[in-house]
Image (cartoon, rainbow, N blue to C red):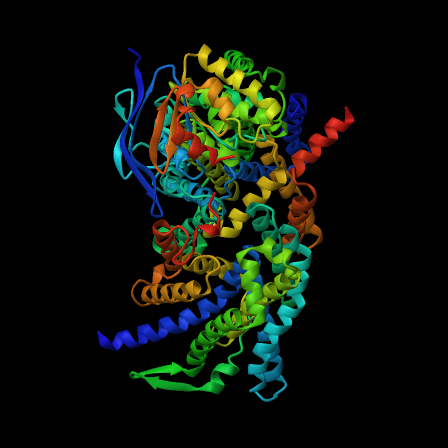
Amino acid sequence: MRISLAVAAVLALAVAPILAPWLEFVLTLAIAKGFAALGVAILLRAGLISIGHAMFFAASAYGVAFLARAGINDFAALVALSVLAAGLAGAVVGAFLVRYRAIFFAMLNLAVSMVFYALFAKLYGVTGGTDGMAVPVPSVFGIVLSEPAFKNTLFYGSLTLMVLVGLGVHRYLDSPLGHALSAVHTNEVRLEYLGIPVWAVLLIAYVVSAALAGLGGAITGFAIGRVVPDFAFWTASGQLVLVAVLGGIGGVPGAFIGALFLELLHSAAVTVTDAWNLIVGAALIIVIMFLPKGLYGLLARRAAVAK
Amino acid sequence: MKQTILQARDLHVSFAGVKAADGVSLDIHQGEFLAVIGPNGSGKTTLLNLCTGYVRPKSGSVHLEGRDITRLTPRAIARLGVARAFQIPQLFSDQRVIDNMMLALAAKDGLWTMVRPLETAARREEARALLDLVGLADDKSRISSTLPEGHRKLLDIAIALALKPRLVLLDEPTSGVSSLERFPLMEALMGALRQRQMTALFVEHDMDVVARYANRVLVWNAGKIMAEGHPDVVFKDERVLQSVVGVA
Amino acid sequence: MSNTVIPLLLDSLASAALIFFAAVGLTLVFSVLRVLNVAHGSLYSIGAYVAASICLFIVSRQLSPYLSFVALLFSAVFVAALFGPLIERTLIRWTYGKSEAVQILITFGLFLILEDVQRMVFGVQSLYEDAPMRLLGTSLIGGVVYLNYQIVLIGMAILVIIGLRLLIRHTRLGRLITAVVADREMAQSIGIDTNRIFILAFSLGVFLAALGGALAVPTSGVAPGLGADTMVLAFAVAAIGGLGQIEGAAIASLIVGFVRVLAIYYVPALDAVAPYAAMLIVLLIRPYGLFGSVTARRI
């Protein structure tokens, strides 16, 4: 994507809450969902659909809640540790799942995520069951903030992370490992005959994707102030896939564009109608059938035509 | 004394009751272009598959420069310096020719990084040099699925060469290639192999190609090596003519 | 010990019967169309809502409660007729030959649409009408009281298994379906109207889904969210049995029913985990399910 356009977009996002304060919450959630969708999109490059990534999203959010309960109160530490936890969970789960492809990969991810969900929902004593757990307002680098001040910090922190992590992921996708990842989809056999251990390439991608989903979960937990088992339900995973697909083939920016589009559309739609699922479902079908390159492809085409 | 690159001893393999390899032993020496010919279904491709680890023999052994590779996976064997080109070209078909080459080069060294880009100046140069070697330099920016069959074969071979292998295994390099393109392809291929001092084993059906480019021929029949030697000698052998004449 | 075995087994069978009805349509549709219908659960719950609404209407108008049995069957037929051909022709047909990713996403979109359609038509209320169940009464088996309705369900599940088998093996339609399943292109080239087969097979799958939902109403009622819950359960069962294998789904239902009831008896907190843990274990040992095979697509 043109760099100037990207910079302008980030600036617009930074300024938006100043003009319309109610946007801050929506945008924070959008960025969080964008991270998680980016994780899903990374695996999509290898032709693997995970309908279970909400489990890492939820695990990280619960991680924040547990760590906070255990006395850790620093924002940076909470985020870092819970993302690490999500990555570790990804390593364990991924070690088994990267042996599979196509529908079986999708289904096994689904199964594992539903185990997570069931555990979160049923272990009332530990996780609060369907009531979930509270995510308290942490201190930021030693400073105790009021809730509104923290929410501001959370938003701008997320925005910064979006840029930094986004650049990092972009580099990864451009690297030999990133290209090998795409090649798994195109010709896995050839990769093996080139001496490349495909399972390792996929496992690395899986861990990265789990960590990204975890980052999204941690941010969401802080933004809402609560984590509930529904964070891990399979429909939540489906939404992440939806966002990844809406964003299209545009790599890093695509996931965030998709998430922003969806959250903004949601905010607009709920004021008018109750049929949010219907709109999303119809939008998904329309995008798949008529915009196979996703919204990113649509924007890229417009830009090219405009030249 | 020429160094032995590959040593196969007493290989036995059957599929569905048919003996694809019946106590086969052979040596491949450094710098050789060894052709394997024989009737269809006689198991020639099985020999290739045994050397690349795709098939495990029921008994017998394969050694690569003294190292036992009989039970290794294709991936491990590829890392040890055995590269394979396929009968149906195995490419990254949605990528450009040069991207295919750079990924293959990275596979050899430099794969394990998440921070440095795939496309470096050095790698691009090396890719271009290899493409030059096989005569595909002009096509470097084309999407590989759009190339004509002969060029796709060359790319498949170039990808194998990018591994800087000690031994290249080619599965019918000229099949699917029009007779016009056949000799230019072989000239380019042989030139590349000679220049890089590589050893090659190729399964082939086209006897003209074999006669012209191989310096040793193995005649494979019903899982056994029926005859072996220089093409001039082998093509005068009565038994060979009888079994090979059966093939088009 | 033996006085828990019989109740355990009978509860497992009853649970298995309902689970089988939830899953069989999904696996049948996959078998013939090679499409995994993520909206399957929604059709189940719509069937349940229609059945519950009609039953409640029958009871409220004090019509013969025996009509409620008819209502259950009718709901399934109605939902199948309304949605089967429509969905197949507009959405499913578009996905043939396309990647699995596309199929999953299109049917996921359909799921979202149907969830809202259901909510708009039936609201967010839970519905429950147990007339069919009450009418059949109870029996005493092994010293425990059982609902005859549950026994009827088990019988119906067996009927469906036998019926499907008979259909596939002993009718002309069954032979056509077998041909299409074996080799779609070949079937087309010898003049089989594959479009008609696909519509029929898909509609049959919708019928079975809606029937499952309807049959579950007298024992468990229907509430929002039933669709999503059922979907993932049906998925798990179909996967355990092997996608597309009907007998596999039957065996998988027995396994999941048994494991679930075991959990309910001894470790109630884990009853929701049971189907997915079972799915994980089975798939890690046999990646294509108990009766699945390589043709169920790997790479």
Residue pictured at 23% horizontal, 76% vertical: C2
Q: Is residue C106 above or below residue B238?
A: below
The answer to whether residue C179 is seen in the rendering is yes
Image position, residue A247 (x, y; %): 62, 37
Residue pictured at 51% horizontal, 82% vertical: C132
Image position, residue C146 (x, y; %): 38, 81
Image position, residue B231 (x, y; %): 42, 21
Residue found at the far left of this picture: C1
| Quadrant containing the N terminus of chain C in the rendered view | bottom left
User: In front: A94, or B22?
Assistant: B22
User: In front: B86, or B24?
Assistant: B24
Q: Is residue B203 above or below residue C104?
A: above
Mark count = 0
Residue pictured at 52% horizontal, 70% vertical: C212
Image position, residue C170 (x, y; %): 52, 73
User: In front: C64, or C39?
Assistant: C39
Q: Is residue A167 above or below residue C82?
A: above
User: In front: C201, or C66?
Assistant: C201
Q: Is residue A3 above or below residue B72?
A: above
Residue pictured at 67% horizontal, 68% vertical: C82
Residue found at the far front of this picture: B238
The answer to whether residue A73 is seen in the rendering is no
Residue found at the far right of this picture: A306
